[in-house]
Structures are given as structure tokens and as C-alpha cells.
Image (cartoon, helix red, strand yellow):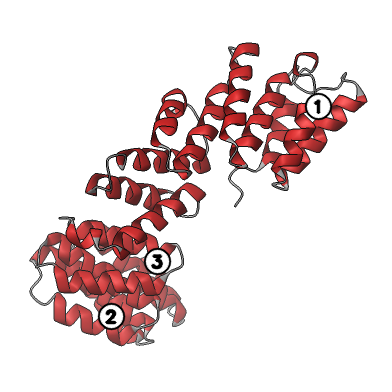
């Protein structure tokens, strides 16, 4: 899986003065472009060969040559070669901003290999010094793996969940998701004293990742496992919204009636708002608009009332009641 779009560096290299190798010998320039192209194609061994043929000290982008060589090695799983490149980068270009980025590559490769000692050493030189959501997801994964150094723990699970929920589509987050599902398969999530909010957050992230049936399983387990509480009622609202988005309007209504009938007063306006949205999804526009208008005129929190008024206006507009919609908007 691609973790870093190499071609995104091209505008950066062109815009920074003095970095474009316009005066380089054709062979070096061609080798650099070839290595760059091979990195983009994830042909890492060939890319390393291309960059290795460029004498870094004779090239204006010498630190990039060494960095790309080390990055390709790290992605190929050749951490010794990547570390050797990192040593050369620091020795030849001690002030290069690429130093922590190459250390990050090494730390992530070590974390993927479950080599906590090597990951910790490289992570100490890179943590907080790299940018981009892809690398931030990798940082999150490294930190979570390091928290597992003495064995899997609830704290490590929390770190994996935060990473997965924050950067769902990135590779580091996907690896955190795989780790969390392994914990679940091994029964560890059930053994640990994790709160209902953990499972609700995990279910939301899993659904965003495109696994609705896994999300459904998490919600169902949480319904059976946890006693009523504010966080429990919030989880039920999440699950009802899940049903609504899946087009399961009858299931959403049944869940709201069964699980939230005795919810505290401060939840009732949210329950009514979601019920109205379910009615709308089911095509019962008159019932939905009536519910939205009652919420907007009642004692709901201002944010909920404003959303209800807006959706009532939307329905009115769909019905051709332009004057009524304009008044509500």
C-alpha cells in the first residue's frame, strides 16, 4: 500500500530556490528522475539502485538522494540498509530537514516487524517532527506498538483506537484496526475493563472503514454487555443512526423505543430528533416535519432546535412550500 505520494514532492522541489538540479549532468538528473519514478511504482529495490548510482555530494539534491535511498530500503523491509543510509544522511547533511523523516521510516518499519527496541530508538529522533496524515497515522501505530512492549494492554488498545478513529483510511490506522480486531478475536477486548464509549467509538470507526457488519456486531455486543448510563444511551443513539443510514428504519424505530424509553430528559430531544430523521428516511414526510417543528419550538438545546428547524424547512421546500421554507430558513 502506498504511504507517501512521491510525485507530491515535485512542486515542492521546483518552488524552493536552489533545489532543482537544472545544472546537473544529464546522467545524474536522469538517474534521479528514474529513481523517483520507481519509488512511485513501489519498485523499491530498483529505486535504491538508481539512487545509489548518484554521487550525493556532487548533486544539489544530495540529501534527497540519500533520503530516498533509505526510504526505499525501509519500505522494502531492509532496515539495516535504511539505518546505514540514515547514518550517511546525518554525517553528510547534519542540518537536513529530512533526517527525522528517514528515522520515521525506520521506526515504522521496525514497528511493523514488532521490533520494539529498534522502533523506540528511531522514534525518539522522529516523533513530532514529521508532517502529513499518513505519517501521523504511522506515528500513532508506532506509539501503540511500543505500549505493547510488555504485552498487549488496555492502554495499547486505547492508543490503537485513537489512531484508527483519527486516520481511518491511512496505512498506520489500518494496521491499528487489524491489531484491535486481533485483540477482539483473542478475547482480550472482552476481558479488559473497557468502557462502553470505547466500543461505540470503535464501531463508528469500523463503519467508516467500510465494515458495517463488524460495526453491527460491536453495537449488538455493547447492547447486551453494558448497563444503562449516559454513555450507553449515546451508544444507542449511534446505533439507531447506523440503522437509519443503512435504510433499516423499522429497526431504528424499534431500538429507540426499546432502549431509550427511560433515557434521562437531556437525551429525549436527541431521541425525538433522530426519530424524525428516521421518519423522513422512511418517506413519512408529514410526520417528520411535524416532529421537527415541535422540537424547534420546544425546550431542546439550541443546536438541536436549529437543526430541526433547518430540516423542517428542507422538507417544506421539497413539498413546494417555498414561502414556508423561507420563513423557517
Which image quadrant for residue 188? bottom left
Task: Reply above or below: 294 against 21.
Answer: below
Establish if 157 lies above or below 207. above
Q: Position of residue 83 (x, y in %)?
A: 57, 26
C-alpha gap between disc 2 and disc 1: 63 Å
Residue 157: which numbered mark, if any? none
Q: Residues within 10 Å of mark 2 (few under 14, many from 20)?
A: many
Q: Secondary structure at mark 2?
A: helix
Decide which of tag 2 and tag 3 comes sooner along the chain. Answer: 3
Q: Earlier in the sequence, mark 1 or mark 3?
A: 1
Q: Which residue is mark 3?
A: 207
Figure quadrant of residue 27:
top right
Residue 159 visible in the displayed image? yes
Badge 1, how many Cα within 10 Å: few under 14, some, many 20+?
some
State the image coordinates of residue 6 (x, y, percent, origin top left).
68, 40
Are discs 1 and 3 less than 8 Å apart at CB? no
Say left or right for 292 vs 83: left
Toward which corner of the image does residue 296 lie, by quadrant?
A: bottom left
Q: CA distance from mark 1 to mark 3?
A: 47 Å
Picture residue at 29% right of the left edge, 50% below the top: 157
Mark 3 secondary-structure assignment: helix
Query: How many numbered marks, from 0 up?
Result: 3
Q: CA distance from mark 2 to mark 3?
A: 16 Å
CB within 8 Å, label 2 to label 3: no
Disc number placed over residue 53 in the picture, else none:
1
The residue at the point 45 percent across, 62 percent down is: 209
Q: Which residue is mark 2?
A: 252
In the rendered image, residue 217, in percent from the top left (x then y), is placed at: 30, 73
Element under label 1?
loop
Residue sitting nearer the eye, 100 or 5: 100
Between label 2 and label 1, give the one nearer the viewer: 1
Amino acid at each position: 500500500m502506498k504511504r507517501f505520494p512521491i510525485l507530491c514532492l515535485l512542486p515542492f522541489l521546483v518552488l524552493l530556490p536552489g533545489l532543482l538540479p537544472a545544472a546537473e549532468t544529464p546522467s545524474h538528473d536522469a538517474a534521479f528522475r528514474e529513481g523517483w519514478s520507481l519509488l512511485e511504482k513501489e519498485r523499491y529495490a530498483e529505486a535504491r539502485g538508481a539512487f545509489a548510482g548518484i554521487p550525493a555530494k556532487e548533486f544539489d539534491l544530495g540529501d534527497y538522494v540519500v533520503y530516498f535511498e533509505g526510504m526505499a530500503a525501509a519500505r522494502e523491509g531492509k532496515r539495516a540498509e535504511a539505518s546505514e543510509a540514515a547514518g550517511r544522511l546525518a554525517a553528510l547533511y547534519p542540518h537536513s530537514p529530512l533526517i527525522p523523516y528517514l528515522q520515521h521510516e525506520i521506526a515504522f518499519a521496525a514497528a511493523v516487524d514488532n521490533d520494539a527496541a529498534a522502533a523506540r530508538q528511531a522514534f525518539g529522533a522522529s516523533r513530532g517532527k514529521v508532517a502529513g496524515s499518513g505519517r501521523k497515522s504511522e506515528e500513532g501505530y508506532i506509539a501503540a506498538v511500543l505500549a505493547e512492549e510488555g504485552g498487549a494492554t488496555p492502554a495499547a488498545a486505547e492508543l490503537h483506537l485513537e489512531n484508527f478513529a483519527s486516520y481511518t483510511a491511512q496505512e498506520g490506522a489500518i494496521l491499528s484496526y487489524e491489531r484491535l480486531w486481533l485483540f477482539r478475536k483473542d478475547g482480550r477486548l472482552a476481558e479488559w475493563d473497557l468502557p462502553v464509549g470505547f466500543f461505540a467509538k470503535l464501531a463508528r470507526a469500523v463503519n467508516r472503514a467500510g465494515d458495517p457488519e463488524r460495526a453491527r456486531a460491536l453495537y449488538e455486543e455493547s447492547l447486551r454487555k453494558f448497563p444503562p448510563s449516559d454513555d450507553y444511551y449515546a451508544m444507542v443513539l449511534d446505533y439507531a443512526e447506523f440503522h437509519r443510514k443503512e435504510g433499516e428504519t423499522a429497526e431504528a424505530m424499534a431500538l429507540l423505543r426499546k432502549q431509550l424509553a427511560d433515557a434521562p430528559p437531556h437525551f429525549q430531544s436527541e431521541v425525538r430528533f433522530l426519530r424524525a430523521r428516521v421518519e423522513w428516511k422512511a418517506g413519512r414526510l408529514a410526520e417528520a416535519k411535524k416532529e421537527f417543528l415541535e422540537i424547534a419550538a420546544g425546550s431542546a438545546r439550541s443546536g438541536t432546535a436549529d437543526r430541526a428547524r433547518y430540516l423542517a424547512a428542507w422538507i417544506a421546500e421539497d413539498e413546494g412550500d417555498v414561502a414556508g421554507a423561507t420563513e423557517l430558513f
